[in-house]
Image (spheres, rainbow, N blue to C red):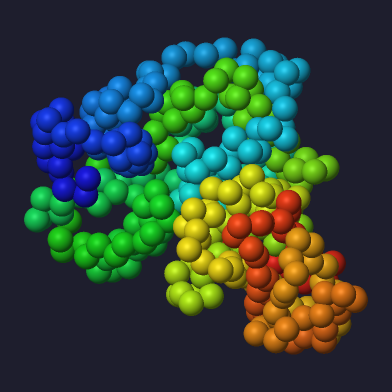
């Protein structure tokens, strides 16, 4: 899809290919992430994958907001937000954990009216937040680079794509530039049932307000990097709920990647305050701090420097905990 004519060529040949549904579903997701460049491909792949794709219709956003407040369930909505298929966490961060290609969601519900939030979901191009306008750079070799501009120097432009990856493009190689607005494709939540959409709206409407969906404090770990003990270089992020719990339901999506592993090492990082640092760890039987084993039986309050420290726990992929959670009233956990 990084080649200008690629979508048309794929469309031309896709009908003759007998592709399994997981492949088609992955293709739908890639086409969505390609924005305008993938719209025709999305229209071709979606029916084959059994994924409903409809044009976003004009909606009464105020009425939807009213319904979400009355009928929506924010707790269920958070699980919908964190579904891998929607890729919300790929582009957006909550409490510092998540992608950086889209606006930060930490205070979304407290800073914006719910009808505005709903409109942004249903019609992403209507109001693109300053600093998040995406561009297509067509290069002289015919390839296309798409993303949000992260920074620019005299000789190059650095774009951040929908996955958060950055690519530096020499200005001398750019043939043309096209503004494409939001990277978020319209119709992204069309596959959701009407009740699921109300739940999702309700969750976004609560973000940043006092209570269980306040992610403004860094006292809990909100992302764990999962790895096999014999392959620590391969890391898979697992994002927690706003309250810091990595529940079994969220972890279940990652477990197939570790089916052949005797254990999972889950690591998170925090900024030490300098001095006594109280830690509370739930859901783990073994833990290490900066590579040194921790005694989980008693109070955990080591003397730490003000540097960044790594907390690692061991999980059983065949019998994961109901919830893994790490917190500290003294430290600040990092989101990346």
Residue 165 in picture, x, y percent from top left: 38, 59
Q: Where is residue 201, by image quadrant?
A: top right
Up-down: is 14 above or below 71?
A: below
Residue 123 in picture, x, y percent from top left: 46, 26
Left or right of residue 64: residue 53: left
Locate the N terminus by quadrant: top left
Locate the C terminus by quadrant: bottom right
Q: Residue at x 19, y 33 (%)?
A: 18
In the depicted view, which residue is nearer to us: 145 or 279?
279
Q: Where is residue 151, by image quadrant?
A: bottom left
Q: Residue at x 59, y 35 (%)?
A: 80
Left or right of residue 237: residue 323: right
In the rendered image, the residue lying farthest to the right is 298
In the depicted view, which residue is nearer to us: 321 or 9?
321
Left or right of residue 324: residue 14: left
Residue 186 in picture, x, y percent from top left: 41, 28
Q: Residue at x 36, y 52 (%)?
A: 161
Q: Where is residue 126, by image quadrant?
A: top left
Residue 187 in picture, x, y percent from top left: 42, 26
Q: Residue at x 48, y 77 (%)?
A: 230
Up-down: is 39 above or below 260?
A: above
Up-down: is 6 above or below 269?
A: above
Residue 76 visible somewhere in the drawing: yes
Residue 95 visible somewhere in the drawing: no
Count of numbered circles on the image: 0
């Amino acid at each position: 899809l990084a080649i200008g004519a690629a979508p048309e060529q794929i469309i031309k040949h896709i009908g003759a290919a007998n592709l399994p549904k997981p492949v088609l579903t992955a293709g739908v997701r890639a086409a969505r992430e390609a924005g305008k460049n993938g719209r025709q491909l999305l229209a071709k792949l979606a029916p084959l994958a059994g994924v409903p794709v409809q044009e976003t219709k004009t909606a009464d956003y105020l009425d939807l907001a009213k319904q979400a407040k009355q009928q929506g369930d924010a707790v269920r909505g958070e699980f919908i937000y964190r579904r891998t298929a929607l890729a919300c966490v790929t582009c957006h961060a909550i409490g510092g954990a998540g992608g950086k290609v889209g606006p930060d969601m930490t205070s979304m519900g407290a800073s914006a009216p719910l009808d505005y939030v709903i409109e942004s979901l249903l019609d992403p191009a209507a109001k693109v937040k300053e600093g998040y306008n995406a561009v297509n750079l067509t290069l002289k070799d015919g390839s296309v680079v798409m993303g949000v501009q992260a920074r620019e120097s005299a000789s190059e432009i650095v774009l951040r794509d929908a996955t958060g990856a950055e690519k530096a493009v020499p200005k001398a190689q750019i043939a043309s530039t096209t503004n494409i607005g939001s990277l978020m494709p319209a119709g992204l939540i069309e596959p959701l049932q009407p009740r699921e959409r109300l739940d999702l709206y309700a969750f976004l409407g609560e973000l940043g307000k006092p209570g269980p969906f306040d992610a403004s404090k860094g006292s809990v770990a909100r992302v764990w990097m999962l790895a096999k003990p014999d392959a620590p270089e391969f890391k898979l992020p697992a994002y927690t709920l706003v309250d810091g719990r990595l529940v079994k339901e969220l972890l279940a999506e990652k477990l197939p990647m570790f089916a052949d592993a005797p254990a999972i090492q889950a690591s998170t990082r925090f900024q030490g305050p300098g001095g006594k640092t109280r830690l509370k760890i739930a859901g783990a039987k073994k833990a290490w701090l900066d590579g040194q084993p921790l005694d989980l039986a008693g109070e955990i309050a080591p003397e730490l420097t003000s540097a960044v420290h790594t907390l690692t726990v061991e999980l059983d992929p065949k019998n994961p905990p109901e919830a893994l959670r790490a917190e500290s009233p003294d430290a600040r956990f990092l989101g990346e």
